[in-house]
């Protein structure tokens, strides 16, 4: 019930407007969001790199409503790619197509993302296209396939697969056939039973099945989860099949299970931390609360720190 509550709160435009403007809201969000400015996220990235993990930076925002916002967002990602290269940080970028204007002008979104992928290719970096709710699944995957086919883009742009989606096994097969890097996660949106598994046991079983397909593919993928049993299943499979630790990475969100992130690094596994930053943190934070309502306590403690 709480999950549904936080997911519906994540979609409230009026609450979002109030929260993002309030000083207290910004203060609460710092546990899971690395500040509002580029300098904040670069500082957080450096610290994570020093602790032995790589990073993917997310400039928070989704469903922009005008062309200027989309262009602004792409401009900021260009700056991030430049700063990452200039400072020698071990980091790439993650973006959402609706933040690049997919809802208002698909052609523009294509142009903006193509520009970023070209820049990433020239800097030997990488662009991950996050997966949003099911109205975007097909378009997002087609988008990534199309970009990946362009000369020079092989291995520079990757997709995200959600194990709660019933279609995911087929999508994985198609992405693997094209040599596209995948981030595997469970999925953060509310989806109906016709298209998505609802029981945790089913989502988990599919996660383990898809993890095995990814690890055996010979392509470099990201296993994105905080769930110790998913991580154990991946490690057990990698050991059994002699899959080298350098041939894939675990991924976790900034501020979540930092203990486990450090343990995996100490044990010699690759770890990438997804760091969100920016002023538009409200929907992101509500989805994290939906996953684990107990995090509300962590957040409230931030007010008094
Ligand atoms: C790097 C990364 C990128 C992602 N990108 C996307 C994306 O593009 N699209 C998308 O739909 N989703 C994305 N997600 C979110 C993902 O789909 C899940 O909603 C989220 O990761 C929670 O699932 P879980 O696998 O961690 O395990 P769950 O089944 O939710 O939880 C299992 C256990 O993990 C721990 N845990 C999980 N969440 C938390 C938390 N918030 N705080 C503390 N402990 C926690 C707890 O021990 C919990 O019992 C991403 C997640 C990561 C890590």
Image: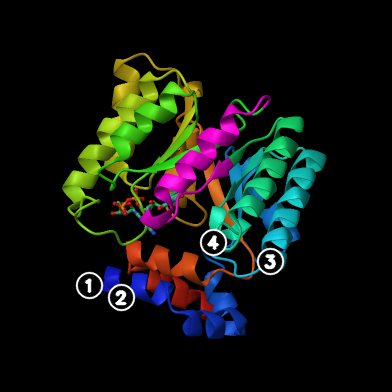
**In the rendering, at what x and y percent does residue 273 appear?**
54, 46
> Pointers 2 and 4 in contact (CB under 8 A)?
no
Q: CA distance from mark 2 to mark 4?
A: 25 Å
Query: Is label 4 in a helix, a strand or a loop?
Result: loop
Residue positioned 72% across, 36% down in the render: 118
> Pointers 4 and 1 in contact (CB under 8 A)?
no
Query: Is label 2 in a helix, a strand or a loop?
Result: helix
Would you say residue 109 sits in the magenta stretch?
Answer: no
Q: Counting other residues with Cα less than 10 Å from the Cα at mark 2, is it few (<14), some (14-19), or many (20 or more)?
A: few
Q: Mark 3 — residue?
A: 69
Residue positioned 67% across, 56% down in the render: 41
Residue 292 in sight from this viewpoint: no
Q: Quadrant of the N terminus?
A: bottom left
**In the rendering, at what x and y percent does residue 110 appear?**
63, 47
Label placed on residue 1: 1
Left or right: 184 with respect to 154?
Answer: left
Relative to 46, does residue 73 appear above or below in the rendering? Answer: below
Q: Earlier in the sequence, mark 1 or mark 3?
A: 1
Residue positioned 29% across, 46% down in the render: 165
User: For residue 150, which quarter of the picture?
Assistant: top right
What is the chief secondary structure element of the magenta stretch? helix
Q: CA distance from mark 2 to mark 3?
A: 29 Å
Q: Mark 4 — residue?
A: 103
Residue positioned 63% across, 36% down in the render: 126
Left or right: 168 with respect to 217?
Answer: left
Q: Earlier in the sequence, mark 2 or mark 4?
A: 2
In the image, the residue with mark 2 has its CB under 8 Å from the nearest atom of ligand 1: no
Q: CA distance from mark 3 to mark 4?
A: 12 Å
């Amino acid at each position: 019930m709480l999950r549904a509550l936080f997911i519906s709160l994540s979609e409230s435009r009026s609450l979002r407007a109030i929260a993002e403007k309030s000083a207290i809201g910004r203060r609460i969000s710092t546990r899971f969001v690395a500040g509002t400015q580029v300098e904040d996220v670069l500082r957080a990235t450096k610290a994570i790199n020093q602790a032995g993990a790589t990073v993917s930076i997310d400039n928070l925002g989704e469903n922009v409503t005008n062309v200027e916002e989309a262009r602004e967002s792409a401009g900021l990602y260009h700056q991030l790619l430049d700063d990452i290269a200039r400072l020698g940080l071990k980091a790439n970028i993650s973006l959402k197509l609706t933040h690049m204007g997919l809802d208002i002008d698909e052609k523009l979104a294509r142009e903006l993302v193509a520009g970023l992928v070209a820049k990433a290719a020239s800097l030997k970096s990488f662009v991950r296209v996050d997966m949003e709710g099911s109205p975007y699944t097909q378009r997002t995957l087609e988008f990534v396939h199309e970009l990946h086919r362009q000369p020079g883009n092989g291995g520079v742009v990757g997709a995200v697969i959600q194990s709660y989606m019933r279609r995911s096994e087929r999508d994985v097969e198609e992405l693997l056939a094209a040599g596209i890097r995948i981030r595997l996660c469970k999925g953060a949106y509310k989806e109906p039973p016709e298209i998505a598994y609802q029981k945790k046991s089913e989502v988990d079983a599919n996660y383990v099945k898809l993890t095995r397909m990814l690890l055996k593919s010979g392509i470099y993928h990201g296993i994105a989860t905080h769930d110790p049993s998913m991580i154990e299943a991946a490690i057990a499979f990698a050991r059994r099949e002699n899959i080298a630790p350098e041939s894939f990475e675990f991924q976790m969100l900034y501020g979540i299970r930092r203990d486990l992130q450090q343990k995996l690094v100490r044990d010699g596994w690759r770890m990438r931390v997804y760091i969100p930053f920016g002023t538009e943190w409200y929907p992101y934070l509500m989805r994290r609360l939906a996953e684990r309502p107990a995090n509300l306590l962590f957040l409230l403690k931030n007010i008094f720190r």
